[in-house]
Each structure stands twice: as structure tokens, then as C-alpha cells.
Amino acid sequence: MGAALADTRVVAILRAENADRAEAVVDVLVEAGVRSLELTLTTKGALDVVERLAARVPAEVEVGVGTVLTAADVDRSVAAGARFVVSPSVEPEVIAAALRHRIASYPGAFTPTEIAAAWKAGASAVKLFPAGQLGPGYLEDVRAPLPDVPVVPTGGVDIASVAGWLAAGAVAVGMGSPLIGDALAPDGDLGALAERAGAALAAARS
């Protein structure tokens, strides 16, 4: 798992129709202390933004790419400067490509079988997705037979639930709209984003 995610325990997920405001949002998040940032391939222009960010963010900030479904996606992401890739599902070719490039991979899984398969394939950590449909109790149950698999709940994780997920054994959490809010919109509130980021990181530290 990436050092930034292991340290701060929060990955911010930026997903929008286009990436026009992504750099401004990332700057706010980094200033607030977020060190792990995922831009999804479903966002138009995401790789261009990743390339620009990779060239200028501090060394301790890890920029990655989400919604990665093929080995070719991994290759393109690495070429842009991504330091990790995230998938909504267990895609062995993505995990293998990430291992080949020596970057972290976080495949999405929902069941114990999928979680075990992702870990066996070489995932750096497993994204429990969509976590909000399951709750921290589910993670506790899964970790009983699979205690060594690092799990990152994502999807429906809000600030109020961060502490509960970590107490249940999550190594980190992925946060999309509950953290980003309207910040990616042209008139989104960046001040409110900074406040939410601070609160999320505080919850992770507690």
C-alpha cells in the first residue's frame, strides 16, 4: 500500500464529467493535508491532469488513477505519472500490470471470495466496494477469516463513519462525493471542501 495512504488513511476520489476544476480541488486537498488522490478515468481529461499534478505536487503526495479496467489503462496511467491504480472490480490483468510497473493496485471487491482472490493475485490492498451498502460490521466479519488482507472501504463512506470503519479494521478509507461535495463544479465551494478534508483527516487520526 502507498506510504501516503498508510500514513493519512484517507484517499480522496475525484469523479466528475470533466477535469476542468480538478487541479484547484487537489490544491485545496493537499493544503488541508490529504496525501492520496485518485482521479477516475470516467472523468474527461483526467490523465492530462494527472500528468500535470505528478510534475508539481510534493514528493509525499501520491496521485493515482481510478476506474482502471485493463492493462492498457495501467500503462497509460503510469505514463502520465500515476503512483497507484484503482479498479471497481477484481481485474487480474490490472493487478499484474501494476506489479510489472511496481506501483500499488487497489481492486474493488464485495464478497470474501473476491477479497481473497484480489489479495492472492497480488493486490496492494483491497477496496471494499460499495462499502456503504455493507457497514463496518461486515468488515469485522470478513476480517475474522482474512485478518491479513488490508481493506480500504470505499463508496458511501462519509466523515461520520470514518472512525467506525477504521475501528472495524480498515487500513484506510476512500472518500468521493461525501468529501468532495460540489467542489468540482465551476462554482463549487472550495472553502467548505477544505473544512470537510480537515474533518475527515481528524476522524482518521482519532
Image (spheres, helix red, strand yellow):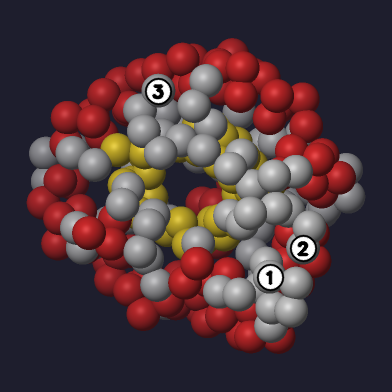
Point 49% across, 27% down: residue = 69
Task: Give the mark nearer the N terminus: 2 vs 1.
Answer: 2
Mark 2 and 1 residues: CB-CB less than 8 Å, in contact? yes
Q: Nearer the viewer, mark 3 or mark 1?
A: 1
Which mark is first along the chain, 3 or 2? 2
Distance CA(mark 2)–CA(mark 3): 30 Å
Q: What residue is disc 2 on?
A: 21
N-terminal of the pair, mark 3 or mark 1, is 3
- The quadrant holding residue 21 is bottom right
In the drawing, does residue 37 fall left or right of residue 56? left
Q: Are the residues at dot 2 and dot 3 in contact (C-beta closer than 8 Å)?
A: no
Residue 48 marker = none
Inter-mark Cα distance, 2 to 1: 7 Å
**Residue denoted by label 3:** 91
Count neighbours of disc 3 (C-alpha within 10 A) and say few if under 14, some if 14 to 19, many if 20 or more: some
Q: Nearer the viewer, residue 44 or 111?
A: 44
Amino acid type, residue under disc 3 in the picture: Glu
Residue 29 visible to the viewer: no
Residue 124, relative to residue 136: is it above or below? Answer: above
Image x and y of residue 141, in percent: 11, 51
Residue 147 lies, with reference to residue 164, above or below; the image says above
